[in-house]
Image (spheres, grey):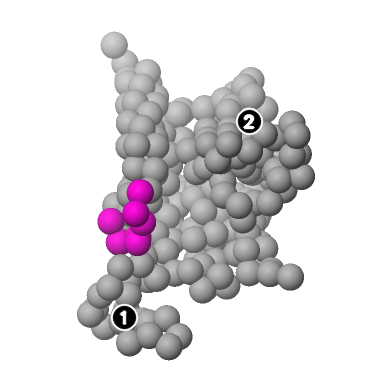
Amino acid sequence: MEFSLLWAALAGVATMGLALRWRRPHLPPHAFDRLMGAVLVGLASGRLAAMAVAGVNPITRPGDLLVVRGGVDTGFASAGALLALAWWFRRDLFRSLDALAPPILFGLAGWQAGCLFRQACLGTASDLPWAWSLPGSQVTRHPVELYAALLLGAGGLWLWGRQVPAGTLAGAALVVAAGARWVTQPLRPSLAGGPVVWYGLAVLVGTVVALVGWRRARPP
């Protein structure tokens, strides 16, 4: 059985869990449980979307929902997770999401760095000193997934201790999360170009949320 994807997921959960532990005084109730619930909702949403695109009927083949390696639509997975969080923290939405924003970025950074377990870090060819090659290959490549992990981790550190109006951190974190994938996408070998439309939409939504939060706190 292949456990590399599981180890990568555990790396993301562990990183997020450590960040939540350090940020505990500022967190809303049941933060870890609800974040893990949002992850499951996101996986289910993304898997259902991928099955629909592939023409697989989830009603007649419900077992295929568990075949995550068969494909998960990134955009629908992210949207499903965010909607789940918005519902669970609806009573104090923006302050809750602000508190969770840095740990979420650290969790995403851990997931991206989990490419080391999956041997899936490399992207397009490169002659840079830190590029490396696949076993049996002489072509060195960008460790593009580690680039994304570094960007996400840096974003989490940047947002960690900032005191800003409600909603600003949540919007900025969405920009960082989508932007890290967007700017590294050209270094990923992909015939379809990746879900760049989703990334662009997330950057736009995050920017609007951050600006609205900032402007609401300004005196008239």
Q: Which residues are magenta?
A: 186-192
Q: Nearer the viewer, mark 1 or mark 2?
A: 1
Horizontal and vertical percent for residue 17? 65, 55
Q: Amino acid at mark 2?
A: Ala
- Residue at 43 percent across and 88 percent down: it is 136
Instruction: Indicate yes or no whether the magenta region holds residue 25.
Output: no
Report the residue marked by disc 2. Answer: 84
Horizontal and vertical percent for residue 112? 49, 61
Quarter of the image where one finds residue 216: top left
Q: Is residue 145 visible?
A: yes
Q: Earlier in the sequence, mark 1 or mark 2?
A: 2
Report the residue marked by disc 1. Answer: 140
- Residue at 63 percent across and 30 percent down: it is 84
Q: Is residue 103 visible?
A: no
- Residue at 32 percent across and 71 percent down: it is 142
User: Taking 90 as reference, is 26 above or below it?
Assistant: below
- Residue at 38 percent across and 85 percent down: it is 137
Horizontal and vertical percent for residue 132? 36, 81
Q: Amino acid at mark 1?
A: Thr
Horizontal and vertical percent for residue 211? 32, 26
SS for tag 1? strand
Residue nearest the observer in this picture, 10 or 18: 10
User: Taking 98 as reference, is 119 above or below it?
Assistant: below
Instruction: Indicate yes or no whether the magenta region holds residue 188.
Output: yes
Residue neighbourhood size for the residue with mark 2, other residues' Cα within 10 Å, grouped as few (<14), some (14–19), many (≥20): many
